[in-house]
Amino acid sequence: MEGSYAPVFCWLGVVYLVWGDRSGRVGISHNPGLDRTFWLQYGYRHFALLTPPLPLGTAAFLCAWLQRYLPLKGEPPWQEARALINKARLKLGLPPWPLPVNDLPSPRPAPAQAELALVQKNLAGRILWREEIAMALAEKKEAVTTPLEDLLHWLYLAGEVTLLPGVGYDPNGEPRCRRCGQASRLLKVACSACGSGDCLVCEGCLTMGQARRCRPLYARPWPARRATGRPGLDARPRLKFPLTPAQVDAYREAENFVFRGREKECLLWAACGAGKTEVACGTIAAALSLGKTILYACPRREIIRELQARLTSIWPELRILALYGGSPGKFGEADIILATTHQSLRFYRRFDLVILDEVDAFPLSEDPMLYYAVERARREDGQALLLTATPPPGLVDRVRRRQVKVIYLPARHHGHPLPVPEILRDPFLSQPGARPLPRILVNCLDQTMAENARLIIFVPAVKLVEEVAAWLLQERPGPDPNRPWVQGCYAAHPRRDAIIAAFRRGEFSVLVATTVMERGITIPRLNVLVLYADEERVFTVNTLIQMAGRVGRSPVYPTGRVWFLARRISPAMAAARRQIQEFNHLARRRGYLQAEEK
């Protein structure tokens, strides 16, 4: 994205003190004449510069420091202000600078109200670089004649827009990225924009453009929400098939979560393949009927694209905007906005309802930045619905402490119980090729072939993919060496998509894979074997549950087989099996399973 912005606006400006008859204010400005015009209209006639031009992050810290410690009543404290500035300068480790020349800046014309209103409208509910605001205007074929940075600064002075440095300082002088919230991935670089030899850049959100100490972010909350929905809008979802009893109960709970509005967060804890998206439609329908703004966020862009088609078929009359890397039209308006969690970084206090899917999925599970982005996208009084089959431990703990409401969806649409993993222990299980195939593994292969099913063998490391595939082929070459019955796949495999597609078509029987296959795959007749399942650094409780969740999703083969094969029984293996059993017990107790399963 960064390459599309030319040139990047660098904010260099002064800290100043402006004073009226009885009180004063501290300010920062890249264009002091504009500030003088603004403050003159409120009777502030005395204006003094306190610093030379500085990067925004530094200027903003000094301004906040003065606002905290400088008396702003009575006579103008010029000398006290300069002493405090020097103290703050030392705290940041900055070299001394000469006193600025206090020539009074000439007033500049005030911007036109129509142009200010145009900028306000395009920034509403977002946090953007100046260059992104220019792109939003261009996307809508709107234009302004006043420099955009001057319009934004006037709105900042008026309290309509928040001005933030890309990388700023907390009250203790510690730097932090103001876009993604991270403090641990900041680099000092020589900056071609501001000319500084030690400008700070954030590595954490670099894919969304450089967040720098000298680069300004502008934010504006979404205006107060509408009392009613869009005129003529039919909020009822047009689902393609009837909901199951389990889905009906969860759907009603999800609706009530929004209608009551008492709880701020709710976890929809669903079995793998139970149809959580259909249940989430309950919250969407309730929010639409109340005229609320909605964000549906997910870590993976392929899910966002699929979801756009799915929701469009359910609500054909709605405007549904999908935002992901490479998507067109980044700044449009819609009834429902779908976005990857990275794209959520551009929203600010915008949505009444945020639905966060695959809460535990990579990269969301390992990146606090993305939680930060989604949380900031929600209005302060907004609600969040979290969707997952495998909530992370911290979220489970909050559910147990009753800090988060929970809705359970424990049964799949076909009414059969979730396949419970069989734990197979082989104390002599070796690395591939060291011994003949273990008899236990041979039995799993034979059972799969006898049932005319296919098998995914999950392994804990990329190097094991080819080794295990070669081990199997060495022991069982197959009838046609040109069409191997085993193939391997991992995230960076050059033929990954082609191999997965061939496996779906049934062109070979066994796929050896890393955790890349733990989500997003539904094959009607499928068994799963997790090899070396006691490797807990890779095979966590949630990973094992997701892998087991690939089995039994189709009514054609609702039972299937799941095997955990290892030298020992790890705590994660036992916990994954126990959680699946608990969901089956809950589904059975609520009457969601077929009669013969009760």
Image (cartoon, rainbow, N blue to C red):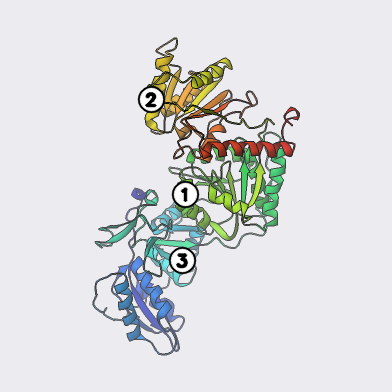
Q: Amino acid at mark 1?
A: Gln
Is residue 334 something one can see in this rendering? no
Is 213 left, or right, of 181 in this rendering? left
Element at badge 2? helix
Relative to 17, does residue 139 appear above or below in the rendering? above
**Mark 3 to mark 2: distance in Å?**
54 Å
Element at badge 3? strand
Tell me the number on the disc at residue 290. Answer: none
**Mark 1 to mark 2: distance in Å?**
36 Å
Provide the residue designation for mark 1.
Answer: 343
**Residue at image coords 40%, 27%:** 465
Relative to 144, does residue 308 appear above or below in the rendering? above
Where's residue 478, x and y in %? 44, 12
Specify which label sits upstream in the sequence, 1 or 3. Answer: 3
Is residue 4 something one can see in this rendering? yes
Is 49 left, or right, of 152 in this rendering? left
Relative to 376, does residue 589 appear above or below in the rendering? above
Provide the residue designation for mark 3.
Answer: 162
Q: Toward which corner of the image does residue 475 lie, by quadrant? A: top left
Specify which label sits upstream in the sequence, 1 or 2. Answer: 1
Front residue of this view, candidates 583 and 242: 583
Where's residue 416, x and y in %? 68, 30
Front residue of this view, candidates 585 and 270: 585
Q: Amino acid at mark 2?
A: Glu
Specify which label sits upstream in the sequence, 3 or 2. Answer: 3
Tell me the number on the disc at residue 466. Answer: 2
Front residue of this view, candidates 381 and 273: 273
Contact, mark 3 vs mark 2 (Cβ under 8 Å): no
Q: Nearer the viewer, mark 3 or mark 2?
A: 2
